[in-house]
């Protein structure tokens, strides 16, 4: 036959939890209520100050790490490459570059308008510089068209393209 447990044997966990919880609440009430001793206040303020100093030091160390990393040649090369890719992307977007045909729509349109017979224009190829210099890219356009004597000629024209599709013809 099983022995019946006393009430305190069944509830010992709750009793301990109540005592510990009451002690913690009393401590919090004394801190929030201003009943802490001067020594406890000094210790608490010192801890808060130490935590603030820790975060300030951690932030300054991270800033120093970042500045050291940003002065490395690897970072500068990576930053230059990112800037160049952005310039190329902006120019391609502004001047309506088509990857499928490999040509700039606006350049081809301007070349067509300059020909004696715009209907005879035929795009052959477009080459562009991989690395932009001075914020522009250099483009070479090879095309066919008929001249004033109705003969088919192949020509190459060179352009400088800037963001916003500013076009400069290079001789």
Image (spheres, rainbow, N blue to C red):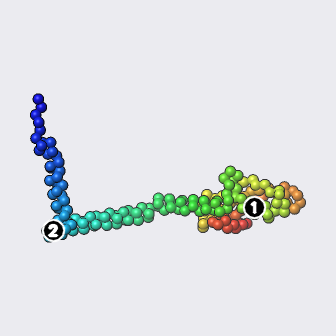
Instruction: Depth check: give the residue in front, 29 or 44.
Output: 29
- Frontmost of labels 2 and 1 is 2
Report if residue 137 is visible in the image: no
Label 1: few (<14), some (14–19) or many (≥20) C-alpha neighbours in 10 Å: few
Q: As displayed, is residue 35 above or below residue 120? A: below
Outermost residue on the right side: it is 149
**Circle 2 is placed at which residue position?**
35
| Residue 157 percent coordinates (x, y) | 74, 61
Which label sits on residue 55? Answer: none
Instruction: Depth check: give the residue in front, 21 or 43.
Output: 21
Residue appearing at x 11%, y 44% in the figure: 8
**Circle 1 is placed at which residue position?**
109
Residue appearing at x 64%, y 60% in the figure: 93
Mark nearer the N terminus (2 vs 1): 2
Residue appearing at x 78%, y 58% in the figure: 155
Instruction: Depth check: give the residue in front, 164 or 160.
Output: 164
Label 2: few (<14), some (14–19) or many (≥20) C-alpha neighbours in 10 Å: few
Instruction: Depth check: give the residue in front, 65 or 71.
Output: 65
> Image check: 105 left or right of 120?
left
Which image quadrant: the N terminus? top left
**Image-quadrant location for residue 25:** bottom left
**Image-quadrant location for residue 127:** bottom right
Q: How many marks?
A: 2
Which image quadrant: the C terminus? bottom right
| Residue 90 percent coordinates (x, y) | 61, 62
Residue appearing at x 38%, y 65% in the figure: 63
Whether tag 2 and tag 1 are in contact, CB under 8 A, the answer is: no
| Residue 161 percent coordinates (x, y) | 66, 64
| Residue 98 percent coordinates (x, y) | 68, 55
Element class at badge 1: helix
């Amino acid at each position: 036959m099983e022995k019946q447990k006393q009430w305190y044997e069944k509830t010992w966990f709750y009793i301990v939890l109540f005592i510990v919880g009451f002690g913690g609440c009393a401590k919090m009430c004394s801190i929030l209520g201003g009943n802490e001793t001067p020594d406890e206040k000094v210790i608490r303020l010192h801890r808060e100050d130490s935590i603030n100093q820790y975060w300030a030091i951690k932030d300054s160390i991270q800033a120093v790490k970042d500045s050291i990393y940003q002065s490395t040649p690897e970072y500068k090369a990576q930053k230059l490459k990112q800037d160049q890719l952005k310039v190329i992307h902006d120019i391609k977007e502004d001047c309506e570059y088509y990857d499928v045909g490999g040509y700039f729509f606006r350049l081809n349109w301007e070349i067509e308008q300059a020909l004696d017979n715009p209907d005879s224009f035929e795009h052959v190829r477009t080459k562009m510089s991989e690395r932009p210099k001075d914020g522009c890219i250099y483009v070479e356009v090879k095309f066919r068209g008929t001249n004033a004597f109705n003969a088919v000629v192949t020509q190459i024209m060179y352009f400088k393209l800037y963001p916003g599709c500013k076009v400069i013809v290079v001789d």
